[in-house]
Image (spheres, rainbow, N blue to C red):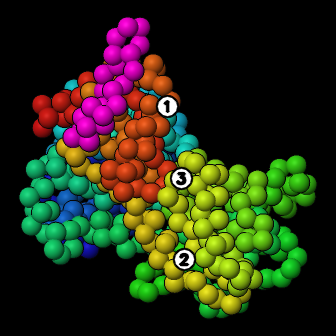
Amino acid sequence: MPSQDPVATLAIVGRPNVGKSTLFNRLTHTRAALVSDMPGLTRDRRDGLAEFGAQTLRIIDTAGLEDGKEGSIARRMREQSEAAVASADLALFVIDSRAGVTPDDEAFARIVRSSGKPVVLVANKCEGHAGESGFYDAYQLGLGSPVAISAEHGEGIGELIEDVQAALGLQDDLTENQDGDASSAKADDDHRPVRVAIVGRPNAGKSTLVNALLQDDRMITGPEPGLTRDSVATDFSWQSRSIRLFDTAGLRRKPKVVERAEKLSNSDAVRTIRLAEVVVLMVDVERPFEHQDLTIAGLVAEEGRALVVAINKWDLITDKQQKLRELREKAKEKLTDLPGIQIVPISALSEKGLDKLMKAVFATQAIWNTRIGTPKLNRWLQDATARHAPPAASGRRIKLRYISQPTSRPPTFAIFCSKPKDLPKSYLRYLSNALRDAFNLPGVPIRLKLRKSDNPFEGDKKRR
């Protein structure tokens, strides 16, 4: 528990059911706030303490900002929330990125802006693909750049704490403490288990690989396809790294999925992919990169997860060097959205190649977590547009004004330009490939989002 007196107070505000109480519990490392899908569960303010680097901060969990008649519970809940903002040094304004920006969000953002307090905009529930559009819609609230997090899964908490420290002028204390434990939440983000999902077609050897990694016959294996039905999570350590490993059911094409149990298994496997950080795609070396393998890889890329390909049954191959060259060439041809993906030959049954596989998993996760400074990105953008200028639209050259990286996991970049709808996909591919080459980002999805706007950080600078 924090032992110092709090140096500042943060109020977590937003409309009901956006995850404020979950974020409160995450920051305070408690379960003091009740969490449920039922809107309005929190009615009173709740205080807690959290360590942000060398400082202790007071966190206030508030009721949802709701309109209501005078004297109603909703109106009293709103008054409590407004009082919390008034007493706080900074407000964390939380939205549900999966629901997008709602009229209530816009109305309550005006209330928070009018308070005159510094605000950090938090886009919660950003795990997976579903929260992407809502995250970028958050720019319209006029509260600066949103911080993408998943309070439930602990993603992005370190970045949130850095933004809070910067808004409160505490970043110098963070810098002085970088050699030690920069912050408890940042350390928690760095040391929590790496979530790894093993996926592939039925009977590709997924459960055999899990047993080999765990050094235990934890999963039922055999020649019959479909032995695994639900996603099984197991925690273990590999060379001092904590890992949460998910064995999933084999994914088949939808027309072949007929039994109810198998339909549920497919859905469970897809959900597991969304919650994973790194997905290991098991490919049978005797039937490599078939249609279903490519479909699974496409799903992983679409969900923004990091991907490593494990070529199983490698002990059956005689000319290994030639076969590996062929597989890498085929991956380059078929997996065009993930150039430079790591291809690791293994034998799950004889437990060979596991060290190389896990090394590839950790390296790919590090790339997936990459964050690039805004000055470096804008110098790169100037060079990229100088080498290959954007095309013209309606007789006028499209201008790319500014680029930033609002989030990692996967690396996601926002480009602010004069005519985003007119910029062709071919030029976006050029920018994406140039980003990969310039900043060494092979084998992970890269997302480029175009926005019609001036520099989005000028408002932040003026406010701070």
Circle 2: residue type: Leu
Residue 104's spot in the image, x, y percent?
43, 27
* Residue at 37 percent of width and 46 percent of height: 435
Give, as a single range, the part of the protein colored magenta: 378-400
Residue 77's spot in the image, x, y percent?
38, 38
Reply above or below: 103 against 89: above
Q: Earlier in the sequence, mark 1 or mark 2?
A: 2
Q: Residue furthest right?
A: 258
For the residues marked 1 and 2, what is the alpha-carbon distance in whole angstroms? 34 Å
Circle 1: residue type: Ser
* Residue at 23 percent of width and 55 percent of height: 162
Residue 389's spot in the image, x, y percent?
33, 27
Quadrant showing the C terminus? top left
Mark 1 residue element: helix
* Within-10-Å neighbours for mark 1: few <14, some 14–19, many 20+: few
The answer to whether residue 392 of the structure is visible from this angle is yes
Q: Earlier in the sequence, mark 3 or mark 1?
A: 3
For the residues marked 3 and 1, what is the alpha-carbon distance in whole angstroms? 16 Å
Quadrant showing the N terminus? bottom left
Circle 3: residue type: Leu
Residue 424 placement, left or right of 199 = left
* Residue at 56 percent of width and 42 percent of height: 130
Residue 452's spot in the image, x, y percent?
35, 22
Reply above or below: 355 against 324: below
Mark 2 residue element: helix
Residue annotated with mark 3? 338
Q: Quadrant of residue 433?
A: top left
Residue annotated with mark 2? 357
Dots 3 and 2: beta carbons under 8 Å? Answer: no
Q: Nearer the viewer, residue 239 or 46?
A: 239
